[in-house]
Amino acid sequence: MIPEAITNPPVQWYGHVSAGLPREDQFTGPFTFPLEGHDRLHMVWSDSPCWETCWNGGNAMQDALRHESIECIVVQHPWMENDCYFADIILPTNTKFETADIGTDNDSGQWNVIFYEEQAIKPVGESKSDKEAVAEVARALEKFGGAYEDLYNRYLGGKTDEEWIEVGFKTSGVPEDLEYDEFKEKGYYPFPTREDWKEIPAGLREFYEDPEGHPLRTPTGKLEYYSTGLAATFPDDEERPPVPHWIDQSPLHQERQYLERGRQYPFLLVSNHPHFRVHAQHDDVTWLREIETCKVTGPDGYKYEPIWVNPIDAGKLGLKSGDIAKIYNERGGVLGGVIVSERIIPGAIYQDHGARVDSIVMGEGGLDRGGANNLIAPIPTTSKNTVGEVTSGFLVNIEKVDVFALAEEYPEAFGRDYDPDCGLVATARIVEGA
């Protein structure tokens, strides 16, 4: 909802939109942004600048970051990832290898092992940790006095990095007699299995044996095939009714091939978490790019994100493996290299999401060379009363393109410094000037 919050405020929603919160949280609200009596957004400060290929509606986000209301964008990041292109100021932060920390084998709160993460290398160049970068901004703000007085120390909580690591150790649930120095020397601590684990009831056994004495956390205390919470709170939500069932279409979602939009965009785009990346991260790893199905080398030497097409559809469209094609809908288009394969069914095409953005034309209706199909994913949330994203299973069309003709039309975009072994290089992202 951030693009809309920037370009068309106010926005409204329910719940705190974080996985793992109690069931009741989805009914809290509505919340409104900006708060009543407050102005719209004028500055963006991001430490995770990969909206365009981690969420849906990336082209809308490009337009939002260039909106006239945004006066300054600050990004802290170790790499020039997608949204960094829009930054006025980039604070160079370091990677996890350049700082000491405490870690676990699971980030959900249900860990089995904690371990001390030693600093592997000294910080590269002038980079600082994310915490240090924010602290230096806090230090700079102190000169304004007032609410900013002693902001640096208040932000750091009066503790060094090592002291905060020790706080994490002591609050992790380790035995009281385990000393921090002992943990640090060994490097890890595996939590033992509870001695009484056999006596702990498995799953829903207590509810099964005594449903009245051990009710569930539903409003009725029982298994609900009819959601009494939804019925009471959102009785008019046609996209998320009390009884879950298949919803073909809605005013916000028209992504079925037999609908009117399907005549213009007849293919269903399947877009999974990528085989060789984590969203956009690792898209520049040279070893991975050597894998045959990681990228498709175009006639211009550029390594394009693969598009898998069934032979029946490829025959109708005049496509063959190695061709460069454009996937598009009314939100814009992205390029990719064709792989003709029986592994995708007719009527669907497949392209992983998360490729690094390489915009030929930015914003709504734009065109991306990198194959970052999050840019053209649907913008609406799951329903009018619940947040959620749509980044797979949406309508597109596909057609073969002549990359040399595109290069003549967009010489600047196609002339950026590029290395097929890793993609766009640093000089492609730097503009010299005042």
Image (cartoon, rainbow, N blue to C red):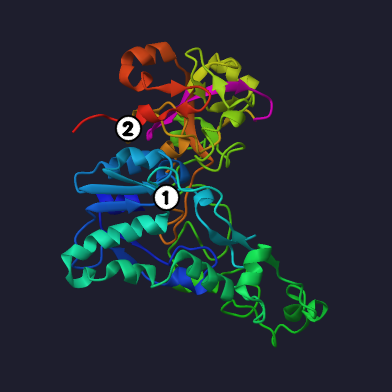
Decide: few, some or many residues near mark 1? Use Cα within 10 Å; few <14, some 14-19, many ≥20.
Answer: some
Task: State the residue in front, 284 or 370.
Answer: 284
Up/down of 196 relative to 99, above or below: below
Task: State the residue in front, 33 or 76.
Answer: 76
Magenta segment boundaries in residue numbering: 326-344
x, y percent for residue 72: 23, 48
Residue 171 visible in the shown view: no
- Left or right of residue 353, residue 433 in this image: left
Decide: few, some or many residues near mark 2? Use Cα within 10 Å; few <14, some 14-19, many ≥20.
Answer: some
Query: Which residue is labeled 1 in the image?
Result: 48
Q: Earlier in the sequence, mark 2 or mark 1?
A: 1
Q: Amino acid at mark 2?
A: Met
Task: State the residue in front, 124 or 104.
Answer: 124
Q: What residue sits 38% from the left and 73% below the top? A: 158
Query: Which residue is labeled 2 in the image?
Result: 362
x, y percent for residue 201: 77, 78
